[in-house]
Image: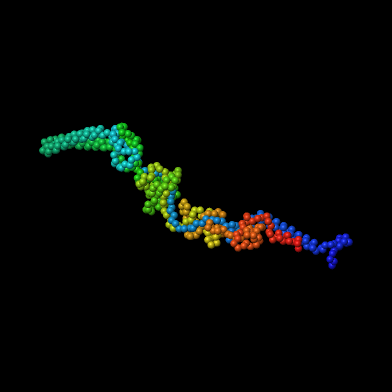
Amino acid sequence: MDQYAKEPHGDTLSRFPRRPGRRASIIGSVIALIALAALGWLAWHLTHPDTAASGNARPGAGGRGGAPATTVGVATAERADIPIVLEALGTVTPAATVTVKPQVSGVLKEVLFREGQMVRAGQLLATIDPRQFEMSLMQASGQRQRDEAQLENAKLALQRYRTLLEQDSIARQDVDTQAALVKQLEGTVMTDRAAEGTARLNLGYSRIVAPISGRVGLRVVDVGNVVVANDANGIAVITQVSPIDVEFSVPQDQVPEVQASAGSGAALPVTVLDRTHVTELGAGRFSTLDNQVDTQTGTVRAKARFDNAKFTLFPSQFVNVRLLLRTIQGAIVVPVTALRHGSNGDFVYVLNTAERTVSLRPVKRGQATADKLEITSGLQAGEKVITEGADRLKDGAQVMLPGDKPAAGGAGKRQGGRRPGGAASGAPAAAGSASVPASDAPASTPPAPRRRRAAEAPAS
């Protein structure tokens, strides 16, 4: 075979061999294909950063399908006592309230109490001028004594008449007339004694005393005024504040439970708090329920009694009532935030500690407090449940706890350029060197080995 080929016209031999020219065109085609592949890889890498990162992450760092693990909050199911408490809005009512009114008319002579003073039952509060009542008592006493003397004289005469009747010296009619006179005088004396007692009672009413123990309100009348019997305003109002009662409403659906707890014989403790639910004002015991349901509100009125030794409860004060009905002993409780609601009912996510995965567990809820919830079935004490971040989970999802460290090494995106320390992106990282995150790697430089091959190709 000739070394040189002829020209197309056949008259001039070519000075260059055919084989080297054909080889150069093949190398140029390979370089073009490599450049196109590099540009395609770079475009895909820029448009799919999350997929590249998840593909290079270490195994176990993400959930199913390569999704990143979710950081969650965890709590342990534990056994605790759950108090069953009925909360209601109540009104403080005094055990007794009395308006002290004068029972006789007269001039108010003395006022012996101070406004807001604590008084005892029987303590003297005020006096009315007693002179007119003393005169009335003297008059009634004199009338009684006069009639008693007439009665005594009539009885002696009757005794003599009966003696004469036995001697047949007097008519029986005279004896009967004298006996009737004695009975008449006995009635008169009895009337006189009643009038004397009334006069003495009125004299006693001139001294106004406290009928109950309690706190005296504001004074209504001053000394020197003429007071009238049974005046509507009276002279003072006494409110019994120790002990004191609190009235509140019980929903009709909870009345049977309240009756059952009260009927067991145990005293039901009741606590009252202020309007902010912060300060405890007193502790007492449940007293009784009303005998009918209020048709407008669907509730039954109830009453509790408090000693109120420190006078923290004030009449007509609005308070928050907590009635302890019973206590569930040794219940399994979890935080309220651990319970989730689905189409098939309530459930919780239980943490598998070793695998760092969660399992969906159907449960049944029981009683609840402000921050705790009873689980009656489906959960055991000591198991860990998810309390935060559960809305991003599903059965079998991978999770991370707040104390876990994120995965290191192999998690960065493989991109062009060199890693810190001078190693190429395609070469393994040197010992002790940290991997570069995908966001920090340069994206515009094609892989170094491919650039060298493209530069050396024409030289061959």
Q: Is residue 12 left or right of residue 257?
A: right
Q: Residue furthest bottom?
A: 1
Q: Measuring 31% from the left and 41% from the top, which residue is drawn there?
A: 119
Q: Is residue 96 left or right of residue 278?
A: left
| Vertical side of 269 occupied by 102: above or below | above
Q: Quadrant of residue 432?
A: bottom right
Q: Position of residue 196 (x, y in %)?
A: 23, 36
Q: Position of residue 170 (x, y in %)?
A: 12, 35
Q: Is residue 347 left or right of residue 168?
A: right
Q: Quadrant of residue 147?
A: top left
> What is the number of callouts on the image?
0
Q: Quadrant of the N terminus?
A: bottom right
Q: Residue furthest front?
A: 421
- Tell which of 289 and 327 is nearer to you: 327
| Vertical side of 440 occupied by 106: above or below | above
Residue 206 in sight? yes
- Tell which of 208 and 26 is nearer to you: 26
Q: Quadrant of the C terminus?
A: bottom right
Q: Measuring 12% from the left and 38% from the top, which residue is drawn there?
A: 163
Residue 344 in sight? no
- Tell which of 278 and 243 is nearer to you: 278
Report the coloring of the rendering: rainbow
Q: Is residue 257 left or right of residue 52?
A: left
Q: Measuring 35% from the left and 45% from the top, which residue is drawn there?
A: 242
Q: Position of residue 151 (x, y in %)?
A: 18, 36
Q: Residue furthest right?
A: 11
